[in-house]
Amino acid sequence: MKPFHLVAVPHEDIIQGRLTMDVFAADLWEVFQGRAVEDYQNPEVFFRKTYLTAGIKTLLKVTSKRLMGEGGDPVVQIQTPFGGGKTHSLIALYHAFTNPEAVRRYFEEAVEAKVVVIVGTAISPRQEEGEITGTIWSEIEKQLEGEVKKLKSPVSPGRERLREVLERHQPLLILIDELLEYIAKAAGIKAGYRELKVGDTNLAAQTIAFMQELTETVKSLDKTLLVVTLPSSVMEYPDEEAAEKMLAKLQKVAGRVEKIYTPVAGEEIYEVIRRRLFRSIDKGAAKEIVNEYIDYYEKEGIVVDKAEYRSKMFRSYPFHPEVIDVLHHRWGSIPTFQRTRGVLRILSLAVYRLKDSQIPLIHLSDFDLSYGELAEELIKHVGREYESVLSGDITARDSNAKKVDRTLGGTYQGLKLGTKLATAIFLYSFSGGERGISLGELKLACADPNIPSSVVTEVVDKLTSTLYYLWREDGRYLFKSQANLNRAIISKMSEIESEQLNQEIKSLIERHAGKALPAYIWPRSTKDIPDSEDLKLVILQTQDLDFAKEILQNYGENPRVNKNTLFFSTPMENERISFETWLRKKLAWESVAKDKSLNLTQAQKREVEKNVKEFKKDERNQLRRFYRLVYVPAKEFREIDLGIPIFGDDRNITNEILERLKAEGEIIEKMSPYLILEKYLGGKDYIEIKQLYKTLLTTPGEPRIGKENFIKSIRNGVAEGIFGFGVIKDGTVECLKFKEMPDVSLQDYEAIIKKELCEKREYEFKETEAMERVFHESTPEVYDTPTSKISAEGAVQVSPAFQESVINSIILEVKLPKGKFSEFYKYVLKSIENSFEKSDVIIKIAARHGSLKKSDYENKVKETLYQINAEIMDEKLE
């Protein structure tokens, strides 16, 4: 989309920054005296930059008709709020009927007439040496006749004398502006009735009497029109009570014959502003931009009446409609704010600051409140106390909104969304009526097609918890000069010492550690963790792996024996700042809740109670997010990242870690008898069971299994005939159980025995039984048979029935199907190894189409090879 200043081209005075208030301050008297700025003095320029609203057009037509003697209202009252276009309307009348040819292209019915101009702020009544000058009636005669003769008295002249002066100057247009201002001054001047002997009165009363005479006189003249302006309220006057009474009297006097007109009505303000600030608008390009915004609103579910809002956006372009509505209606309802003039002034400053930007549409959030002139135009209407509010929360380099800007992700960090949204909320915060803005309204007012509207929610949440003067009341956000709870929270947070913070972290761990594994929290020395056979979790204060290694190796001054029973939990250090900030806030809210010296409102008390509960509820989640690393001893520490906590997971820390360790295979419920056979018994005749268990406890990286489960695994291996069970006596082993369940108690003499020895013992036992049976059942005669014979000593010698051929050497190269190595080992390799004194087995593994973590390769594959004394002859990794 094109930048707005290429679509709506500003007037040169806007681009150049010639933005003094007099450019927008319409002054009828200065025009009358010929010394106004060109925008008001030059009739052609004035009409070119003025949007002729329906109200102004009607006023011009009514005036033209009256001055041509075609009837119409003799008296017109223009009544609007302060700055609502009253004076601007009078200037339009002045130019139209004093320079009709100059404005003919804008108003064809213009006719030439005599115009009298009375401005209450320019004319001052005076009393010198008993003489009173500067009355409205004397000023009228002076402008018409060139001198004052008939209307010289300080007393209202009466209708007949007034008619004599007015009638011969028809067509006549009398413009009276700021009448109430004049009467307020006239109230301080006494007007004597000495010749009438009726006492004293003031000039204000005489002026009101004159206005009644004037309206009645004008009514009797067919080509004379009186146009008078009155304010809609008197709140801008010092003595409001007196001004209110005078205004009521004027309205009563003029109301008998007047017609009231409003110069600017409804959405005409859009075109008034566009005409005054921009010299041209590319309507095609403006329509494209508006359509893109409407499509964005529809996509994001921002509820608007598409057709109506499209039209409204087009009429207000290059401003978002909310910009003009907020300034004209909300700020315009502030008594001191000059509605049309004030809006023009503020918008001209905004356009000047944005004239080089790339934005396609001007939002309230685009206003640069750090620009002194712009800020001043706002602050002067709401109070100087808001200077510190603006500085602390929005405009200063280290303001809270800019802190929010820096916390946003990289995608949005440079967009200053915190500052922009805070700016929009500030501008929505002031009104004579409803204040503040809802989240939905904020999404509409600050929409950017390049940013999802959900981001607005995220940023507003951050602003709400960070800014000092931003309040949320009944679902609406607004700024106040009174600090919110954030300031108290920040103050409380700054009071929290590191020692208190650390103690709270430790307390949180103690509350949420659980008992699934014995937990040792923040040990100071290696002796704080017992050197027992139980599995245990060491929770460290920091991610200090050097200390973890020291604990692993030592128990006080002695070497640690049961190294393989330890696991370590540590915080993730790059989460520390976030976690400690959260914890400081938690402690701060709890401190505010206990602080009886704070004068909190009921709403604030409810907010404190709500936040204390929410922070309490979030304890486990925040602690687990911080303590998410587990280190498992092996050849080197293996790191397990528990990841981001799952929403709603209420498991305690040790329970979650235990389950994860089991899932990772770091803690097992049973050992495969084949693993015991292949990894530990191997080629040995036997191994001591208790020593095997000690090996598992003392060697980091070995399988971790509880004692009862270990014994069960041994018993199952014996019962399944994978190995035997026996005892060691005098350096020899005796097989006691094979293929039946033994009783194992981890005594020093208990051993598992390779099954071949148990099978041989069983065979020899049966063979001996058979030989004894033959020996006892046979006769003493010597039988000479081809298959057996008994020696003279009585021993039985068995001869084979036939001589079988034998193999003396084997070299076998085999390619195994996946998953068949166990059978290969059990039925092929073991048979060969049992038949030959020396058998060298060289295994070549070619693994493809998959992946294996390097840590798993090192800890599970190579570590196992080292444990069984295997020689790695070649290794190629990719």
Image (tube, grey):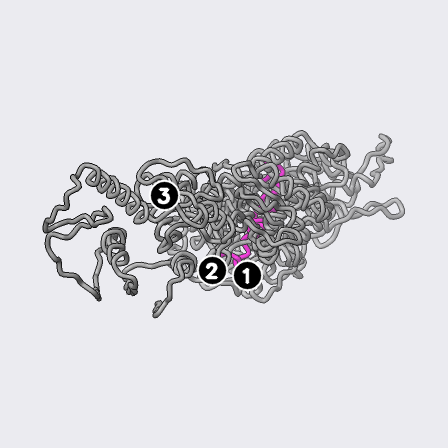
Instruction: Give the SS element for disc 2.
Output: helix
Q: Earlier in the sequence, mark 2 or mark 3?
A: 2
Residue tagged 2: 4
Q: Is residue 127 left or right of residue 9?
A: right
Contact check, label 2 and label 3, Cβ < 8 Å: no
Q: Which label sits on residue 735? A: 3
- Badge 3, how many Cα within 10 Å: few under 14, some, many 20+? many
Disc ID at residue 613: none
Query: Mark 2 or mark 3: which is in front?
Result: 3
Q: Amino acid at mark 1?
A: Leu
Name above or below for residue 820 compared with residue 847.
above
At 41% across and 35% down in the image, what residue appears? 743
Of residues 532 and 500, the one drawn nearer to the viewer in this rendering: 532
How far apart marks 1 and 3 lie (CA) works out to: 95 Å
Is 682 placed left or right of 380 in the picture?
Answer: left
Residue range highlighted in magenta: 410-436
The x and y percentages for residue 454 are: 46, 46
- Mark 1 = which residue? 354
Whole-angstrom CA distance, mark 2 to mark 3, is 95 Å
